[in-house]
Amino acid sequence: MPTYANLNLPFLGGGPTIAEQILQGLHEGATEKLQQQQSDLEKQRTTSDVALQGAQTQEIQERMRRQKVLQDMFQPKPDESGTAPAVSTDTGAMPGTTAAPAARSDFDRVVDQSDLPDSLKDSIKYNGRAQAAAGQPVKAFDFFQTVLDKFGRKVSPHILSNGGIPYAVTDRFGEPWELHDAGMPDEMKPLAAAANKVFEQKNILPPMDVQNANLANNRRWQVLHPGQPLPGDLTLPQNASKDEYARIEKQFGDLTQLESVKAQRDAANAARDAGRSDREQQQGITPVIGQDPKTGKDVLVSEAEAKTMGLIGTMKADSADVSKAQSARHWIPLASKTATIQRVDPNDPNSAAANPEEMGVLQLIDDLDKRGKLGTIASRWNNFMAGTVGSGDPEVEALRAKMGLSTTLLMNAHVGNRGGSYMMEHFEDLANAGKMDASTLRSGVKSELDYIKDRAMMPQRTGGATPKAGGLSPDNPFSPNNPFAPKRPQ
């Protein structure tokens, strides 16, 4: 056995050497490793993209919450403690009377609590209102902190509330922090935790929990109703109570269960409708045999057509009857159809037809007889069927092909593919006995056609009209509506 010189290993002749196999294996291993690395990199990239999107979403949410805090800080509101000085703007007020406490923003309150001179406080508050009106509240705090740093002053950290509900805390520099801000200094977290206890005491949800609950409910709603906004009765308002949250959760659970029941019911109804439609269709196209009361003959049609025709004594047709009727209906146009003859030589009426494939067997026999060629074909029938007589004449070739096709169709129409064609065997017997001629050939085909029409069990139409080729009438053997329609002959 030959060996590879360097490796001293045997190899089979006609195929790759061991070295080639090793190199191929190394190449495939390297390729697989590279593909695995690429797959791992793609997974890491996908994971990184998801993490980045999550971080970006969280950053956007924190920025929105901070913006909301800044907006709330510049909204005027009455002092909740009632300790603010009462200022009367009514010059006609009675001496010794006081007006209702003036509304102030939380920014003004933070500035007032600093130990800066009053003149500076007024300037800081005026600047803050101007910056907030210009949409730049951050600059108001920057200016405030700059003044504090210049004078070495601080403010006392405290909780900012709105209607008794805390929404932020301020540090010693007067900067506000949303209660759940991830960037909040550690020294402010105990104060924020104390503020959050108010939510528990008042049985309400913190703003972040309300926001997250609405986001989650909106995702669930989009599953049930894509593209539709979350309804108001399923949206938690600001400072929603825990009872309100529980109510919406129960309502969502009930709604989801109802949607599931509805989906199951719709699916069951669709399946039932489809099954009923299939049964009706199946019942409508099932082939049956019944007696036509108008003619007294048995016909083979679909069950739906049988009801329309009023057939009597109908019974389901077995596969053998359907097969025989198929072959019979297939052979009838093959034998009896007629066409407008177009001569090869239009000036010679005895020239062969140019369109013999459009002519039926009987029309071909009549035209060949007219041209004086049928006698030769009939007298030498076996040679004709063997292809040694009439070769080159298009009509003769067409007749031979259609008679050959007739053999299979008539065999099935007579005995269901388990015997011979009586007509063709009869013609062979006559030819062997020397009794086959043109007249015998024509009469034999006509007799077979009369018999096959009975085997086809085709219904008779009013007026005895024959359906046009390609029509939709159930008695058309090539109708696509016929459950037992045969394939058109080629």
Image (cartoon, rainbow, N blue to C red):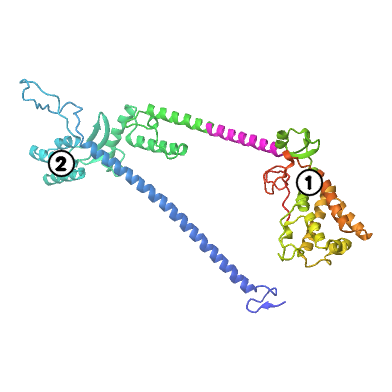
Left or right: 378 in relation to 177: right
Check the image and report above or below for 17 versus 91. below
Q: Secondary structure at mark 1?
A: helix
Mark linked to residue 130? 2
Q: Is residue 209 magenta?
A: no
Q: Nearer the viewer, residue 102 or 295?
A: 295
Left or right: 440 in relation to 225: right
- Residue type, numbered disc 2: Ala
Q: Secondary structure at mark 2?
A: helix
Q: Residue at x 14, y 24 (%)?
A: 100
Is residue 420 visible in this depiction of the protein? Answer: no
Q: Position of residue 428 (x, y in %)?
A: 89, 58
Q: Which residues are magenta?
A: 262-285
- Which one is in front in this view, the residue at disc 1 or the one at disc 2? 1
Q: Quadrant of the N terminus?
A: bottom right
| Chief SS of the magenta region | helix
Separation of marks 1 and 2 at Cα, in angstroms: 97 Å
Lower position in the chain sequence, tag 1 or tag 2: 2
Picture quadrant where residue 362 is located: bottom right
- Residue type, numbered disc 1: Ser
Q: Residue at x 80, y 57 (%)?
A: 366
Q: Residue at x 52, y 61 (%)?
A: 35
Q: Nearer the viewer, residue 258 or 286?
A: 286
Q: Quadrant of the C terminus?
A: bottom right
Is residue 307 visible in this depiction of the protein? Answer: yes
Check the image and report above or below for 125 versus 241. below
Q: Position of residue 177 (x, y in %)?
A: 26, 40
Mark linked to residue 199? none
Q: Which residue is mark 1?
A: 323
Q: Position of residue 245 (x, y in %)?
A: 39, 30
